Image (cartoon, helix red, strand yellow):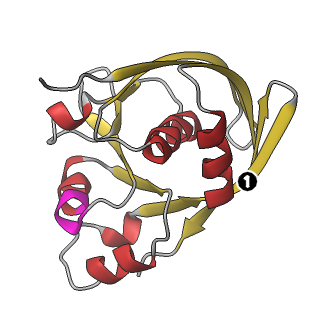
């Protein structure tokens, strides 16, 4: 018998002073059985960091031709293709052809991924945005992960502050140069 996805409900008060985004988000996120907890946490944080009109999670593994997170315009065209983790070069190449903006949020070291990408053809690699989230931040969020979570996320420059009950988790999102 195949395992089913686990549903997580997140209530997030987002305050992103960099972009002037102040929203209350209610997210219902399905976690596929093959998806790690750190990938899930990174996916939710990336959604918050990219939050804008038209943003949505894809259907995930059931639709591998779609981005993990997409920002679509009113016509349904993809304006931003957002990947999580360590996508292979062919996926990033496809993203560069399909969207005007491509961002990747990594929850692991990016050195090996960049090494693998170095010898591959990636469309508009010079425009690719690669971000790395602090591993300690991801680990702390995974430790606190529950199927129903309420927290506040404040973003100031590259610093992230997550207020989770009486606890505050701090970390950074760092832009990594892709060359």
Residue at figure coordinates x 34%, y 35% from the top left: 70
Residue denoted by label 1: 171
**Prevalent SS, magenta region:** helix
Q: For this view, does 89 lie left or right of residue 12? A: left
Residue 159 can be seen, yes or no: no
- The magenta stretch is 88-92
Query: Judging from the image, what secondary structure is the residue with disc 1 in?
Result: strand
Residue 90 painted magenta: yes
Is 57 situated above or below 143? above
What residue appears at the point 67 percent right and 51 percent down from the top-left corner? 137
Quadrant containing the C terminus is bottom left
Horizontal side of 91 relative to 144 (left or right) equals left
Quadrant into which the N terminus falls? top left
Dividing the picture into quadrants, the one containing residue 22 is top right
Residue 45 visible in the shown view: yes
- Residue closest to the far front: 1
- Specify few, some or many for label 1: CA neighbours under 10 Å numbering under 14, 14-19, or 20 or more: some
**Magenta stretch containing residue 123, yes or no?**
no
């Amino acid at each position: 018998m195949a395992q089913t996805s686990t549903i997580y409900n997140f209530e997030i008060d987002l305050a992103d002073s960099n972009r002037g985004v102040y929203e209350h988000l209610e997210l219902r996120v399905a976690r596929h059985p093959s998806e790690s907890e750190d990938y899930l946490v990174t996916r939710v944080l990336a959604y918050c960091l990219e939050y804008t009109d038209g943003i949505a999670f894809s259907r995930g593994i059931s639709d591998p031709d779609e981005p993990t997170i997409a920002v679509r315009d009113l016509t349904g065209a993809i304006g931003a293709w957002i990947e999580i983790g360590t996508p292979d070069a062919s996926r990033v190449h496809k993203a560069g052809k399909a969207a005007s903006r491509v961002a990747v949020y990594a929850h692991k070291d990016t050195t090996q991924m960049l090494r693998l990408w170095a010898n591959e053809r990636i469309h508009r690699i010079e425009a690719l945005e690669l971000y790395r989230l602090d591993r300690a931040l991801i680990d702390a969020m995974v430790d606190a992960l529950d199927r129903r979570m309420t927290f506040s996320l404040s973003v100031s420059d590259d610093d992230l502050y997550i207020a989770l009950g009486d606890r505050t988790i701090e970390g950074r999102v760092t832009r990594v140069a892709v060359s």
